[in-house]
Amino acid sequence: MLSRPQIPDALDYDLDPQTGFVLSQAVDLPEYYRPWCQLCSDLPQLLQTRTLRARVDSLETLSPEHLVGPAYWKRAYLVLGYLTQAYIWQDKTNPSPIIPASIGDPFIKICNHLGTAPVLSYAGSSLSNWMPLSDNNGHPDPAEILTDFSRIKSYVTFTGTRDEDAFNMVPSMVEATGGKLITLLLDIIRVERTGHAPDLLPVLQICSSTFKRMAEILSILHQNCNPDFFYHQIRPMLAGSAGAQDKGLPDGVTIYCSDGSVVVVRCVGASAGQSSLFQFYDHVLGVEHGSKMLVTMRPYMPRLHREFLGAVEALPSLRDIVDCHYPDDGEVLAAFQLALDALRHFRTKHIAIVSRYIVQPAAAEAKRMLADGLQPVLEEKGTAGSKPVPFLKQYRDETVPI
Ligand code: HEM
Protein backbone atom coordinates (compact mmCIF):
# COMPACT_ATOMS: atom_id res chain seq x y z
CA MET A 1 0.00 0.00 0.00
CA LEU A 2 1.29 3.48 -0.86
CA SER A 3 2.08 5.54 2.25
CA ARG A 4 0.41 8.93 2.42
CA PRO A 5 2.67 12.00 2.51
CA GLN A 6 3.35 13.24 6.02
CA ILE A 7 1.82 16.49 7.22
CA PRO A 8 4.81 18.74 7.90
CA ASP A 9 5.35 20.09 11.40
CA ALA A 10 6.02 23.83 10.95
CA LEU A 11 8.66 23.75 13.70
CA ASP A 12 10.78 21.27 11.70
CA TYR A 13 10.97 23.83 8.90
CA ASP A 14 12.09 26.81 10.94
CA LEU A 15 8.64 28.34 10.98
CA ASP A 16 7.24 30.06 14.03
CA PRO A 17 3.58 29.33 14.91
CA GLN A 18 3.06 33.03 15.74
CA THR A 19 5.15 34.84 13.11
CA GLY A 20 5.24 32.28 10.29
CA PHE A 21 8.24 32.78 8.02
CA VAL A 22 9.30 35.99 9.82
CA LEU A 23 12.31 35.82 12.15
CA SER A 24 10.85 35.29 15.61
CA GLN A 25 13.85 36.43 17.68
CA ALA A 26 15.24 39.90 16.95
CA VAL A 27 18.78 38.95 18.01
CA ASP A 28 21.93 41.05 17.86
CA LEU A 29 25.01 39.44 16.35
CA PRO A 30 27.69 38.48 18.92
CA GLU A 31 30.46 40.98 19.74
CA TYR A 32 32.90 39.11 17.43
CA TYR A 33 30.90 40.47 14.45
CA ARG A 34 31.14 44.10 15.56
CA PRO A 35 33.14 45.08 12.40
CA TRP A 36 30.20 43.96 10.20
CA CYS A 37 27.62 45.64 12.45
CA GLN A 38 29.62 48.88 12.53
CA LEU A 39 29.65 48.96 8.73
CA CYS A 40 25.90 48.38 8.73
CA SER A 41 25.29 51.21 11.23
CA ASP A 42 27.43 53.51 9.09
CA LEU A 43 26.00 52.23 5.79
CA PRO A 44 23.82 55.23 4.81
CA GLN A 45 26.72 57.62 5.36
CA LEU A 46 29.30 55.32 3.72
CA LEU A 47 27.09 55.09 0.64
CA GLN A 48 26.58 58.83 0.51
CA THR A 49 30.31 59.48 0.67
CA ARG A 50 31.05 56.47 -1.57
CA THR A 51 33.54 55.09 0.91
CA LEU A 52 31.95 51.72 1.66
CA ARG A 53 34.07 49.79 -0.85
CA ALA A 54 37.33 51.06 0.66
CA ARG A 55 36.15 50.04 4.15
CA VAL A 56 35.17 46.56 2.97
CA ASP A 57 38.49 46.15 1.13
CA SER A 58 40.39 46.66 4.38
CA LEU A 59 38.06 44.52 6.52
CA GLU A 60 39.39 41.35 8.13
CA THR A 61 37.64 38.15 7.03
CA LEU A 62 35.49 36.83 9.87
CA SER A 63 34.33 33.25 10.30
CA PRO A 64 30.68 32.17 10.64
CA GLU A 65 31.65 29.74 13.41
CA HIS A 66 30.46 32.15 16.12
CA LEU A 67 26.86 32.05 14.85
CA VAL A 68 25.18 30.06 17.58
CA GLY A 69 21.65 29.39 16.30
CA PRO A 70 19.24 29.78 13.34
CA ALA A 71 18.29 33.37 14.21
CA TYR A 72 21.98 34.37 14.19
CA TRP A 73 22.65 32.73 10.82
CA LYS A 74 19.69 34.61 9.36
CA ARG A 75 20.84 37.92 10.82
CA ALA A 76 24.36 37.37 9.48
CA TYR A 77 22.90 36.56 6.05
CA LEU A 78 20.97 39.83 6.16
CA VAL A 79 24.00 41.85 7.28
CA LEU A 80 26.32 40.45 4.60
CA GLY A 81 23.54 40.57 2.01
CA TYR A 82 23.25 44.33 2.56
CA LEU A 83 27.01 44.80 2.51
CA THR A 84 27.39 42.89 -0.78
CA GLN A 85 24.57 44.89 -2.42
CA ALA A 86 26.07 48.13 -1.12
CA TYR A 87 29.51 47.11 -2.41
CA ILE A 88 28.10 46.43 -5.90
CA TRP A 89 25.84 49.48 -6.18
CA GLN A 90 27.74 52.16 -4.19
CA ASP A 91 28.34 53.76 -7.59
CA LYS A 92 25.21 53.01 -9.60
CA THR A 93 26.76 54.06 -12.91
CA ASN A 94 29.84 51.95 -12.24
CA PRO A 95 28.76 48.82 -10.33
CA SER A 96 31.41 46.51 -8.98
CA PRO A 97 31.52 43.15 -10.82
CA ILE A 98 33.43 41.59 -7.91
CA ILE A 99 32.89 41.04 -4.19
CA PRO A 100 36.13 40.70 -2.21
CA ALA A 101 36.74 37.71 0.06
CA SER A 102 36.48 39.85 3.21
CA ILE A 103 32.70 39.69 2.93
CA GLY A 104 32.40 37.23 0.03
CA ASP A 105 33.91 34.25 1.84
CA PRO A 106 31.61 34.31 4.90
CA PHE A 107 28.63 35.27 2.72
CA ILE A 108 29.02 32.16 0.56
CA LYS A 109 29.41 29.97 3.65
CA ILE A 110 26.30 31.45 5.26
CA CYS A 111 24.22 31.12 2.07
CA ASN A 112 25.33 27.48 1.76
CA HIS A 113 24.38 26.86 5.38
CA LEU A 114 20.91 28.35 4.86
CA GLY A 115 20.59 26.69 1.44
CA THR A 116 19.80 29.89 -0.41
CA ALA A 117 21.12 31.71 -3.50
CA PRO A 118 24.16 33.93 -2.80
CA VAL A 119 22.36 37.27 -2.99
CA LEU A 120 20.27 39.43 -0.67
CA SER A 121 16.73 38.08 -1.07
CA TYR A 122 13.35 38.84 0.51
CA ALA A 123 14.15 36.39 3.34
CA GLY A 124 16.93 38.81 4.31
CA SER A 125 15.69 42.30 3.43
CA SER A 126 12.26 41.81 4.99
CA LEU A 127 11.71 38.55 6.86
CA SER A 128 14.91 38.72 8.97
CA ASN A 129 15.28 42.49 9.19
CA TRP A 130 12.99 43.72 12.01
CA MET A 131 14.00 44.93 15.45
CA PRO A 132 12.19 46.79 18.24
CA LEU A 133 12.53 50.56 17.92
CA SER A 134 13.39 50.83 21.58
CA ASP A 135 13.86 48.24 24.28
CA ASN A 136 12.02 50.30 26.90
CA ASN A 137 9.32 47.67 27.13
CA GLY A 138 11.57 44.79 28.13
CA HIS A 139 11.17 41.82 25.79
CA PRO A 140 8.03 42.42 23.75
CA ASP A 141 6.16 39.54 22.18
CA PRO A 142 7.38 39.41 18.52
CA ALA A 143 3.92 38.66 17.13
CA GLU A 144 2.47 41.63 19.02
CA ILE A 145 5.19 44.14 18.19
CA LEU A 146 5.04 43.14 14.52
CA THR A 147 1.50 44.57 14.39
CA ASP A 148 2.70 48.10 15.16
CA PHE A 149 4.94 50.00 12.72
CA SER A 150 5.65 52.71 15.33
CA ARG A 151 7.44 50.08 17.46
CA ILE A 152 9.71 48.48 14.86
CA LYS A 153 12.50 49.43 12.48
CA SER A 154 14.96 47.70 10.17
CA TYR A 155 18.13 46.10 11.53
CA VAL A 156 19.94 47.30 8.39
CA THR A 157 19.04 49.87 5.72
CA PHE A 158 20.81 51.57 2.83
CA THR A 159 19.35 55.00 3.55
CA GLY A 160 18.61 55.19 7.29
CA THR A 161 15.09 56.47 6.61
CA ARG A 162 11.58 55.60 7.84
CA ASP A 163 10.64 55.26 4.15
CA GLU A 164 12.99 52.31 3.88
CA ASP A 165 11.79 50.95 7.23
CA ALA A 166 8.25 50.97 5.84
CA PHE A 167 9.36 49.23 2.66
CA ASN A 168 11.13 46.50 4.68
CA MET A 169 8.72 46.20 7.61
CA VAL A 170 5.30 46.25 5.91
CA PRO A 171 5.91 42.87 4.22
CA SER A 172 7.06 41.46 7.61
CA MET A 173 3.92 42.81 9.26
CA VAL A 174 1.78 41.28 6.53
CA GLU A 175 3.64 37.97 6.79
CA ALA A 176 3.50 37.81 10.59
CA THR A 177 -0.25 38.49 10.50
CA GLY A 178 -0.81 35.85 7.83
CA GLY A 179 1.70 33.39 9.30
CA LYS A 180 -0.75 32.44 12.05
CA LEU A 181 -2.90 30.69 9.45
CA ILE A 182 -0.19 28.14 8.67
CA THR A 183 -0.75 25.79 11.62
CA LEU A 184 -4.51 26.39 11.53
CA LEU A 185 -4.72 25.25 7.91
CA LEU A 186 -2.41 22.29 8.41
CA ASP A 187 -4.56 21.22 11.38
CA ILE A 188 -7.59 21.03 9.07
CA ILE A 189 -5.72 18.61 6.83
CA ARG A 190 -4.62 16.67 9.93
CA VAL A 191 -8.22 16.27 11.11
CA GLU A 192 -9.30 15.14 7.65
CA ARG A 193 -6.63 12.43 7.85
CA THR A 194 -8.44 10.88 10.79
CA GLY A 195 -11.44 10.28 8.51
CA HIS A 196 -13.57 13.01 10.12
CA ALA A 197 -15.02 16.03 8.37
CA PRO A 198 -13.04 18.98 9.73
CA ASP A 199 -14.86 22.01 11.05
CA LEU A 200 -14.09 24.20 8.05
CA LEU A 201 -16.46 27.10 8.52
CA PRO A 202 -14.70 28.94 11.38
CA VAL A 203 -11.30 28.42 9.77
CA LEU A 204 -12.47 29.84 6.45
CA GLN A 205 -13.91 32.81 8.33
CA ILE A 206 -10.55 33.38 10.07
CA CYS A 207 -8.86 33.19 6.66
CA SER A 208 -11.16 35.92 5.30
CA SER A 209 -10.62 38.24 8.25
CA THR A 210 -6.85 37.64 8.21
CA PHE A 211 -6.52 38.36 4.48
CA LYS A 212 -8.55 41.56 4.99
CA ARG A 213 -6.27 42.63 7.82
CA MET A 214 -3.22 41.90 5.63
CA ALA A 215 -4.65 44.13 2.90
CA GLU A 216 -5.26 46.92 5.43
CA ILE A 217 -1.62 46.77 6.56
CA LEU A 218 -0.54 47.75 3.03
CA SER A 219 -1.80 51.29 3.70
CA ILE A 220 1.11 51.72 6.17
CA LEU A 221 3.41 51.63 3.16
CA HIS A 222 1.44 54.36 1.39
CA GLN A 223 1.57 56.54 4.51
CA ASN A 224 5.26 56.14 5.23
CA CYS A 225 7.21 55.51 2.03
CA ASN A 226 7.54 58.15 -0.66
CA PRO A 227 7.24 56.54 -4.13
CA ASP A 228 9.95 58.69 -5.76
CA PHE A 229 12.33 58.06 -2.88
CA PHE A 230 11.65 54.33 -3.16
CA TYR A 231 12.11 54.31 -6.92
CA HIS A 232 15.32 56.35 -7.04
CA GLN A 233 17.07 55.61 -3.73
CA ILE A 234 15.96 52.21 -2.41
CA ARG A 235 15.08 50.09 -5.42
CA PRO A 236 18.39 50.49 -7.30
CA MET A 237 20.25 49.13 -4.26
CA LEU A 238 18.23 45.90 -4.40
CA ALA A 239 18.98 45.23 -8.06
CA GLY A 240 20.20 41.77 -9.00
CA SER A 241 23.00 40.73 -11.32
CA ALA A 242 20.83 38.63 -13.69
CA GLY A 243 20.16 40.39 -17.01
CA ALA A 244 22.07 43.44 -15.74
CA GLN A 245 24.08 44.03 -18.94
CA ASP A 246 22.52 47.47 -19.42
CA LYS A 247 23.42 48.41 -15.85
CA GLY A 248 27.12 47.61 -16.32
CA LEU A 249 27.26 43.97 -15.18
CA PRO A 250 27.54 41.98 -18.44
CA ASP A 251 29.01 38.93 -16.69
CA GLY A 252 27.12 39.00 -13.40
CA VAL A 253 29.08 39.33 -10.16
CA THR A 254 32.11 37.27 -9.10
CA ILE A 255 32.36 36.52 -5.38
CA TYR A 256 35.87 35.74 -4.10
CA CYS A 257 36.52 33.19 -1.37
CA SER A 258 39.54 33.05 0.95
CA ASP A 259 40.97 29.90 -0.69
CA GLY A 260 41.18 31.70 -4.06
CA SER A 261 38.08 30.01 -5.53
CA VAL A 262 35.30 32.13 -6.99
CA VAL A 263 31.52 31.88 -7.29
CA VAL A 264 30.00 33.59 -10.33
CA VAL A 265 26.53 34.86 -9.54
CA ARG A 266 23.72 35.87 -11.87
CA CYS A 267 20.80 36.29 -9.50
CA VAL A 268 17.66 38.41 -9.43
CA GLY A 269 17.21 41.03 -6.69
CA ALA A 270 15.11 40.86 -3.53
CA SER A 271 11.35 40.80 -4.12
CA ALA A 272 8.31 39.76 -2.11
CA GLY A 273 7.70 37.54 -5.13
CA GLN A 274 10.07 35.28 -3.15
CA SER A 275 7.52 34.95 -0.33
CA SER A 276 6.84 31.34 0.72
CA LEU A 277 3.64 32.31 2.53
CA PHE A 278 1.66 33.23 -0.57
CA GLN A 279 2.76 30.09 -2.41
CA PHE A 280 1.60 28.15 0.66
CA TYR A 281 -1.83 29.85 0.53
CA ASP A 282 -2.18 29.20 -3.17
CA HIS A 283 -1.64 25.49 -2.76
CA VAL A 284 -3.71 25.06 0.38
CA LEU A 285 -6.64 27.02 -1.05
CA GLY A 286 -6.36 25.22 -4.38
CA VAL A 287 -5.43 28.28 -6.46
CA GLU A 288 -3.58 27.41 -9.66
CA HIS A 289 -1.45 29.82 -11.70
CA GLY A 290 -0.63 29.59 -15.39
CA SER A 291 2.77 31.27 -14.92
CA LYS A 292 5.42 29.30 -13.07
CA MET A 293 7.61 32.42 -12.72
CA LEU A 294 7.33 32.51 -8.94
CA VAL A 295 8.28 28.83 -8.67
CA THR A 296 11.64 29.89 -10.17
CA MET A 297 11.99 32.12 -7.08
CA ARG A 298 12.28 29.14 -4.74
CA PRO A 299 16.09 28.94 -4.86
CA TYR A 300 15.96 32.41 -3.23
CA MET A 301 14.10 31.04 -0.21
CA PRO A 302 15.98 29.35 2.65
CA ARG A 303 16.17 25.57 2.02
CA LEU A 304 13.82 24.71 4.91
CA HIS A 305 11.12 27.07 3.65
CA ARG A 306 11.47 25.67 0.14
CA GLU A 307 11.23 22.12 1.50
CA PHE A 308 8.18 23.09 3.55
CA LEU A 309 6.41 24.17 0.35
CA GLY A 310 7.38 20.88 -1.29
CA ALA A 311 5.93 18.94 1.66
CA VAL A 312 2.70 20.99 1.61
CA GLU A 313 2.26 20.50 -2.13
CA ALA A 314 2.12 16.74 -1.60
CA LEU A 315 -1.03 17.21 0.53
CA PRO A 316 -4.65 17.66 -0.54
CA SER A 317 -5.91 21.24 -0.68
CA LEU A 318 -8.88 22.69 1.18
CA ARG A 319 -10.63 22.70 -2.19
CA ASP A 320 -10.26 18.87 -2.24
CA ILE A 321 -11.56 18.68 1.33
CA VAL A 322 -14.57 20.87 0.50
CA ASP A 323 -15.35 18.70 -2.55
CA CYS A 324 -15.09 15.54 -0.48
CA HIS A 325 -16.98 16.53 2.68
CA TYR A 326 -19.11 19.57 1.84
CA PRO A 327 -19.91 19.42 -1.91
CA ASP A 328 -23.46 20.76 -1.40
CA ASP A 329 -23.04 22.80 1.78
CA GLY A 330 -23.97 26.32 0.72
CA GLU A 331 -22.59 27.90 3.89
CA VAL A 332 -19.15 26.30 3.55
CA LEU A 333 -19.00 27.02 -0.20
CA ALA A 334 -19.88 30.67 0.44
CA ALA A 335 -17.24 30.95 3.17
CA PHE A 336 -14.67 29.41 0.84
CA GLN A 337 -15.60 31.93 -1.84
CA LEU A 338 -15.30 34.81 0.66
CA ALA A 339 -11.84 33.66 1.74
CA LEU A 340 -10.63 33.62 -1.85
CA ASP A 341 -12.28 37.00 -2.50
CA ALA A 342 -10.30 38.42 0.44
CA LEU A 343 -7.01 37.03 -0.90
CA ARG A 344 -7.90 38.37 -4.32
CA HIS A 345 -8.61 41.78 -2.76
CA PHE A 346 -5.13 41.72 -1.16
CA ARG A 347 -3.69 41.13 -4.63
CA THR A 348 -5.72 44.02 -6.06
CA LYS A 349 -4.35 46.38 -3.40
CA HIS A 350 -0.85 45.09 -4.10
CA ILE A 351 -1.22 45.93 -7.81
CA ALA A 352 -2.06 49.51 -6.78
CA ILE A 353 1.25 49.58 -4.87
CA VAL A 354 3.19 48.39 -7.90
CA SER A 355 1.51 51.04 -10.01
CA ARG A 356 2.30 53.82 -7.52
CA TYR A 357 5.85 52.71 -6.63
CA ILE A 358 7.13 51.42 -9.99
CA VAL A 359 4.95 52.20 -13.00
CA GLN A 360 4.25 55.87 -12.24
CA PRO A 361 7.80 56.89 -11.20
CA ALA A 362 9.19 54.94 -14.21
CA ALA A 363 6.88 56.84 -16.57
CA ALA A 364 7.82 60.17 -14.95
CA GLU A 365 11.52 59.36 -15.29
CA ALA A 366 11.09 58.41 -18.96
CA LYS A 367 9.32 61.73 -19.56
CA ARG A 368 12.13 63.64 -17.85
CA MET A 369 14.75 61.89 -19.98
CA LEU A 370 12.83 62.63 -23.16
CA ALA A 371 12.59 66.31 -22.18
CA ASP A 372 16.38 66.31 -21.71
CA GLY A 373 16.82 64.88 -25.21
CA LEU A 374 17.87 61.46 -23.87
CA GLN A 375 16.69 58.05 -25.00
CA PRO A 376 14.34 56.91 -22.19
CA VAL A 377 14.80 53.49 -20.62
CA LEU A 378 11.52 52.34 -19.12
CA GLU A 379 12.66 50.78 -15.81
CA GLU A 380 9.41 49.23 -14.76
CA LYS A 381 10.43 45.59 -14.43
CA GLY A 382 10.03 43.97 -11.02
CA THR A 383 13.22 43.12 -9.10
CA ALA A 384 12.41 39.45 -9.69
CA GLY A 385 12.29 40.31 -13.41
CA SER A 386 8.57 40.34 -14.21
CA LYS A 387 6.70 42.88 -16.34
CA PRO A 388 4.76 43.46 -13.18
CA VAL A 389 1.27 44.75 -13.81
CA PRO A 390 0.08 42.24 -16.45
CA PHE A 391 1.78 39.45 -14.49
CA LEU A 392 0.23 40.43 -11.17
CA LYS A 393 -3.21 41.02 -12.70
CA GLN A 394 -3.13 37.51 -14.11
CA TYR A 395 -2.08 36.23 -10.67
CA ARG A 396 -4.93 38.15 -9.07
CA ASP A 397 -7.51 36.97 -11.62
CA GLU A 398 -6.47 33.36 -11.07
CA THR A 399 -7.29 33.69 -7.35
CA VAL A 400 -10.69 32.10 -7.77
CA PRO A 401 -12.23 28.78 -6.77
CA ILE A 402 -11.42 26.04 -9.31
C1 HEM B 1 7.03 49.32 -2.86
C2 HEM B 1 6.51 48.15 -2.51
C3 HEM B 1 6.36 46.97 -3.44
C4 HEM B 1 6.70 46.82 -4.73
C5 HEM B 1 7.34 47.85 -5.64
C6 HEM B 1 6.36 45.47 -5.12
C7 HEM B 1 6.56 44.93 -6.37
C8 HEM B 1 6.30 43.63 -6.72
C9 HEM B 1 6.57 43.07 -8.01
C10 HEM B 1 7.14 43.84 -9.18
C11 HEM B 1 6.23 41.77 -7.98
C12 HEM B 1 6.35 40.75 -9.12
C13 HEM B 1 7.62 39.94 -8.94
C14 HEM B 1 8.86 40.75 -9.36
O1 HEM B 1 9.13 40.86 -10.54
O2 HEM B 1 9.57 41.26 -8.45
C15 HEM B 1 5.73 41.50 -6.66
C16 HEM B 1 5.25 40.30 -6.25
C17 HEM B 1 4.75 40.09 -5.01
N1 HEM B 1 4.69 40.97 -3.98
FE1 HEM B 1 5.18 42.89 -4.02
N2 HEM B 1 5.79 44.82 -4.06
C18 HEM B 1 5.79 45.71 -3.00
C19 HEM B 1 5.29 45.47 -1.73
C20 HEM B 1 4.80 44.27 -1.32
C21 HEM B 1 4.32 44.03 0.00
C22 HEM B 1 4.25 45.03 1.14
C23 HEM B 1 3.94 42.73 0.04
C24 HEM B 1 3.36 42.03 1.23
C25 HEM B 1 3.83 40.86 1.63
C26 HEM B 1 4.16 42.16 -1.28
C27 HEM B 1 3.89 40.87 -1.65
C28 HEM B 1 4.11 40.34 -2.91
C29 HEM B 1 3.78 38.98 -3.28
C30 HEM B 1 3.14 37.94 -2.37
C31 HEM B 1 4.17 38.82 -4.59
C32 HEM B 1 4.00 37.56 -5.45
C33 HEM B 1 2.76 37.67 -6.29
C34 HEM B 1 1.50 37.22 -5.55
O3 HEM B 1 1.53 36.19 -4.86
O4 HEM B 1 0.47 37.90 -5.71
N3 HEM B 1 4.69 43.14 -2.07
N4 HEM B 1 5.79 42.65 -5.91
Image (cartoon, grey):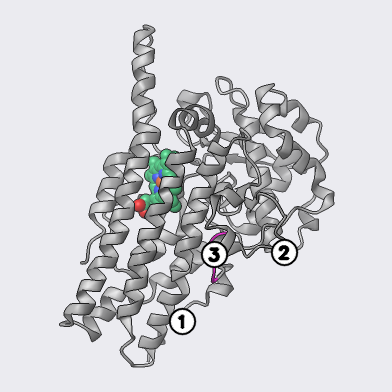
Is residue 320 in the magenta section? no
Kindly identify the residue that appears in the image at 46 percent across and 51 percent down: 274
Helix, strand or loop at mark 2? loop
Kindly identify the residue that appears in the image at 78 percent across and 39 percent down: 38
Kindly identify the residue that appears in the image at 65 percent across and 37 percent down: 84
User: Disc 3 marks which residue?
Assistant: 19
Query: Within 10 angstroms of label 1, few (less than 14), some, or many (20 or more) residues?
Result: few
Question: Which is the main secondary structure of the residues drawn in magenta?
Answer: loop
* Mark 1 to mark 3 CA distance (whole Å): 23 Å
The stretch of residues the image draws in magenta is 17-22
- Going from N to C along the chain, the mark reached first, 3 or 2, is 3
- Going from N to C along the chain, the mark reached first, 2 or 1, is 1
Check contact, mark 1 vs mark 3: CB within 8 A.
no
User: Disc 2 marks which residue?
Assistant: 69
Q: Is residue 348 above or below residue 278?
A: above
Q: In which quadrant of the rendered view does residue 255 lie?
A: top right
Which residue is at the far top?
373
